[in-house]
Image (cartoon, grey):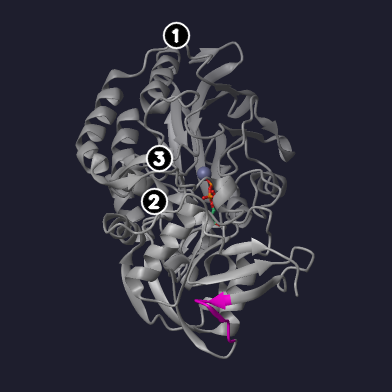
Amino acid sequence: PASTTGKHITLLHTNDMHARAVESSPEMGFAKITGIINQYRSQNPDTLLLDAGDAVHGTPFATLVQGESVVKVMNEMGYDAMVPGNHEFNYGWKRLVELSGMMKFPLLSSNVKQADGTNLFKPYLIKEVDGVKIGIMAFSTPETMYKTNPTNVAGLQITDPAVEAKKLVSELRSKVDVIVGIGHLGEDKSSIDTSLKLVKEVPGIDVFIDGHSHTVLENGLAGDNNTLIASAGEYTKYIGVVDVWVDGGKVVKKEAKLVDEKKAANIKPDEKVAALVDSIRKAQEPILKEKLGETPVKLEGSREKARTGETNLGDLLADAMRDVSKSDIAITNGGGIRASIEAGTITKGDIVTVLPFGNQIVQLKVTGADVLAALENGVSDYPQSKGGFSQVSGVSFKIDTSKPKGSRVHSVKVGDKALDPKAIYSLATNDFMAIGGDQYTMFSKYKQAGMYGALDEALITYIQKGGQILAESAGRITEGPMP
Ligand code: ATP
Ligand code: ZN
């Protein structure tokens, strides 16, 4: 609407929700977030709702149906546009195209392209709100190419977002009053293609709404070229609010803030969204509650433990992989284990929470030298955290932390025999690592000797048949000086 400072438009935004469907403090869940959206919409009809990626994956609510549940909820919430994050590709890009077909709003990305250079999704959108034309351009992180299973992005390329932005801004400038970027790029210094870099290289963007680094920007961030960067943390803990005032075809004032559960204490969750989330969860409940077995101890799979050392859950999973594939050795990445299982009943829900990626088990026939190289890669950052930390079965070894990365593994035994660098071993791993994920590049040259079904199915089968659960890790990976 009109105000003394021009026409007032509100941009509401979410990012990195990771399918946190229900309220669980400090996470607000979809219904509460929608309650806040309702409030803003009633205050200002000139409101747009945008998502900056990583929404359709991360909890069983989403993974059980490959993201469809979250799309249904987002349709009900009334999004105007979304950009895919790296996790949107977790079910394969063809599934993402399917999901985008179910969305009542456009999925936009200017830099996700097929091999021939054609865009997989629309690069931008022009929305007219109260006579104000708003161009919304979208950018996905090129990191997706190595942060997801390569088969999920096979045949795609993700080009430099700054290069695309430059082209789009020059195209849009004459057509619109406001230029908004939505990106899953992040402000993390360890990333190359950050939103900070993009707005520095590309003048003319009024507001850049970002995700990926899960950053909490209470009042946005003043990027270069007078671009306001906004980002709303993670897991529905916040919703972002950017107010812009437009006069004479340009933005004359802009402000960003976040709303969390404290600020929203008096706001009622949206009833329709609450009912929809409930009905989806009720339908999933019998599947998730299915009892598979019991564990007398906690099975350790937390990020802090499974990415820094051997755990009893890592052992169990690697044992299950070795068992189903009858391999000499199994290696799986600690980063692929996404949660612990508490002592007591083990349910199907626990397993899909631990293993949400839908990985397959692959057997390779590898040389002893490459087994060693793989183990070196797994513990290269030890005792620091690494997604590729190796959880193993059929093999034991020691780490000498005084030695440099790449030559710190010793006393390697396969079964009870010393590893022979020249011998050929059958090795089970997951499909992500088999094609070089988490820097297991030594695996990618091998032809896949066999596929043994889904990782979660193997773990379920192994638990059901009474596979041994250990109270502590088995001591397959220990520290010790080189002899
Ligand atoms: P976000 O993008 O929300 O920050 P992220 O998943 O990209 O989260 P991390 O939580 O650090 O970042 O997880 C990355 C790790 O997850 C990888 O190093 C790898 O160990 C594991 N991982 C990712 N995709 C797969 C996959 N398809 N299969 C097995 N493991 C995977
Ligand atoms: Zn994320």
Seen at 53% across and 19% down, the residue is: 8
Q: Is residue 236 left or right of residue 96?
A: right
Query: Alpha-carbon neighbours of circle 2 within 10 Å: few (<14), some, or many (≥20)?
Result: many
Residue 109 appears anywhere in the view = no
Image-quadrant location for residue 422: bottom right
Instruction: State which tag comes first along the sequence, 3 or 2.
Output: 3
Residue 360 appears anywhere in the view = yes
**Where is residue 129 shown, x and y percent of the image?**
44, 27
- Tag of residue 356: 2
Select label 3 or label 1 by which is in front. 3
Q: Amino acid at mark 1?
A: Asn
Along the line of sight, the residue nearer the viewer: 418 or 68 = 418
Instruction: State which tag comes first along the sequence, 1 or 2.
Output: 1
Along the line of sight, the residue nearer the viewer: 341 or 116 = 341
Seen at 30% across and 59% down, the residue is: 457
**Where is residue 482 shown, x and y percent of the image?**
75, 72
Seen at 60% across and 43% down, the residue is: 213
- Tag of residue 266: 1
Q: Could you tell me how far apart the alpha carbons at marks 3 and 1 are, in whole angstroms? A: 37 Å
- Tag of residue 343: 3
The span picked out in magenta is 413-420
Q: Amino acid at mark 3?
A: Ala
Marks 3,2: beta carbons within 8 A: no
Q: Amino acid at mark 2?
A: Pro
In the structure shown, which secondary structural element does the residue marked by tag 2 occupy?
Answer: loop
Q: Could you tell me how far apart the alpha carbons at marks 1 and 2 are, in whole angstroms? A: 35 Å
Marks 1,2: beta carbons within 8 A: no
